[in-house]
Image (cartoon, rainbow, N blue to C red):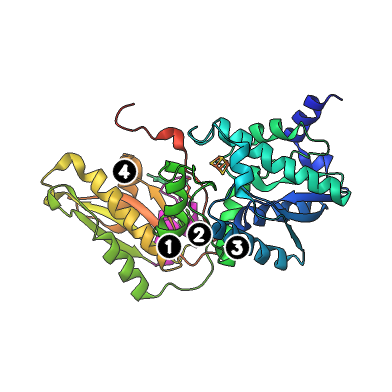
């Protein structure tokens, strides 16, 4: 099989190719990226030897910081880290003339080459026949580009660590371990303002975690939801913005099992209500409408507020859309005895999530959806 064909096969399913236990030198760019990569290598029965040689990282105390975080990860797995002496001047010489290339361009390819060469030489020195890199875990770095560079070094083992949600896993594990996560790629030419760097910053450090962790929860434990918590959800719902401040929302809180059973049948997608401790019907008081066309937008904002507060209260919740489906709205009106001027908008099932089925971060960032100033 030619080298390209092997590469292609690695892309398809690296587990099938690796998994029979061998020594491998793992070039580690930092602690956070090493978490999921290491986990994956161990799952695949590799015996990793960790190598930190990242002369691209600037300044030197940043290099130290990233090394220190890697040590924490290594300790967890009872592994040692080999550190190459720091020599940023040597790296600068290697990328000379490419300083002003934008991130992801030629300079970065040369930088990959520098780091992979160093890892290759270390592997040769140690008599380890395989080596790979954690660089592929980043969703901001093209694994294909890294593999193309790696191909020219004997023993390079192209493992795409971002596969199988590897990046999200690295975010989660780093968070659990309280690891420092850098806010730029590495060198002094890294783009500090790129949306991707800001994205890392926001989601993992500064942002409202509930927004990122909220999920639709459909499996609940039997634990009763405290009335104070329900009140808190409704307070959050009522804080939503609305057109002309019309605040046309109102609510029915349902915990009567018979009514829950009836509500669970109003749509094929609302079955989980039968087993939910509480369901909140989110309704529109049409007598309050000043901007009638905006009622669905207002109640959408109100529902999202409620879901975010539920996440904050460690509850699970699921939004079930009802309006504008008239049959579903009519069923709800009849089950809850709503007057004519009250229109059902949505049902939200609420409860404590069943173990292992709670809110969790899923990475949905897609930079291709963002345009600046014009399409
Ligand atoms: C307007 C709207 C209607 C929805 N209706 C239902 C529904 O009837 N049943 C259901 O199980 N989930 C429903 N969902 C939840 C979506 O399926 C869910 O948000 C989506 O799959 C993304 O998953 P996440 O909420 O875990 O991020 C609805 C969500 C919205 C915003
Ligand atoms: S931006 Fe990152 S990958 Fe590119 S040259 Fe700098 S350190 Fe290397």
The answer to which of marks 2 and 1 sits earlier in the sequence is 1
Residue ID for mark 2:
359
- Quadrant of the rendered image containing residue 86: bottom right
The answer to which of marks 4 and 2 sits earlier in the sequence is 4
Q: Are marks 2 and 1 in contact (CB under 8 Å)?
A: yes
Which disc, if any, is residue 126? none
Q: Secondary structure at mark 4?
A: loop
Residue 316 within the segment the image draws in magenta: no
Could you tell me which residue is drawn at 66 percent across and 36 percent down? 146
Range of residues picked out in magenta: 255-275
The answer to which of marks 3 and 1 sits earlier in the sequence is 1
Crowd rating for badge 3 (residues with CA inside 10 Å; few <14, some 14–19, many 20+): few
Looking at the rendered image, the disc whose residue lies closer to the viewer, 3 or 4, is: 3
Could you tell me which residue is drawn at 55 percent across and 66 percent down? 178
Quarter of the picture holding the C terminus: top left
Name the spot of residue 324 as percent of width and height, x first: 30, 40
Q: Is mark 1 within 8 Å of ligand 1?
A: no
Q: Is mark 3 within 8 Å of ligand 1?
A: no
Q: Is mark 4 within 8 Å of ligand 1?
A: no
Q: Looking at the image, can residue 344 be seen?
A: no
Alpha carbon separation for disc pair 3 and 4: 31 Å
Residue ID for mark 1:
311
Q: Is residue 111 left or right of residue 294?
A: right
Name the spot of residue 219 as percent of width and height, x first: 54, 59
Name the spot of residue 47 as percent of width and height, x first: 83, 55
Which disc, if any, is residue 323? 4
Alpha carbon separation for disc pair 4 and 1: 24 Å
- Residue pushed farthest left? 290
Which disc, if any, is residue 356? 3
């Amino acid at each position: 099989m030619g080298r390209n064909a092997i590469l292609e096969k690695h892309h398809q399913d690296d587990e099938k190719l690796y998994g029979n236990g061998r020594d491998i030198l793992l070039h580690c760019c930092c602690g956070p990226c090493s978490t999921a990569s290491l986990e994956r290598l161990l799952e695949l029965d590799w015996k990793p030897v960790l190598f930190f040689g990242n002369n691209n990282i600037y300044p030197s105390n940043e290099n130290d910081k990233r090394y220190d975080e890697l040590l924490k990860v290594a300790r967890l797995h009872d592994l040692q880290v080999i550190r190459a002496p720091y020599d940023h001047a040597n790296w600068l010489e290697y990328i000379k003339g490419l300083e002003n290339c934008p991130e992801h361009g030629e300079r970065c390819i040369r930088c990959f080459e520098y780091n992979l060469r160093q890892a290759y030489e270390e592997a040769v020195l140690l008599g380890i026949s395989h080596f790979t890199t954690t660089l592929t875990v980043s969703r901001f770095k093209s694994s294909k580009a890294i593999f193309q560079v790696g191909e020219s070094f004997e023993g390079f083992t192209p493992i795409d660590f971002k596969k199988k949600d590897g990046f999200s896993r690295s975010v989660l594990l780093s968070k659990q371990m309280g690891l420092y996560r850098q806010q730029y790629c590495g060198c002094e030419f890294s783009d500090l303002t790129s949306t991707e760097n800001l994205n890392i910053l926001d989601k993992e450090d500064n942002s409202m975690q509930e927004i990122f962790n909220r999920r639709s929860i459909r499996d609940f434990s039997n634990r009763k939801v405290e009335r104070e918590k329900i009140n808190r959800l409704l307070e959050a719902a009522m804080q939503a913005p609305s057109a002309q401040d019309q605040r046309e929302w109102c609510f029915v809180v349902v915990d009567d099992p018979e009514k829950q059973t009836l509500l669970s049948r109003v749509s094929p997608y609302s079955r989980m209500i039968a087993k939910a401790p509480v369901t909140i019907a989110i309704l529109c008081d049409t007598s309050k409408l000043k901007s009638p066309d905006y009622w669905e937008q207002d109640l959408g904002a109100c529902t999202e507020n409620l879901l975010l507060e539920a996440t904050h209260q460690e509850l699970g919740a699921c939004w079930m859309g009802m309006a504008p489906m008239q049959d579903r709205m009519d069923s709800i009106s009849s089950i809850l005895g709503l007057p004519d001027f009250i229109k059902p908008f949505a049902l939200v099932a609420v409860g404590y999530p069943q173990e292992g089925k709670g809110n969790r971060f899923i990475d949905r960032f897609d930079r291709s959806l963002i345009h600046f100033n014009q399409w």
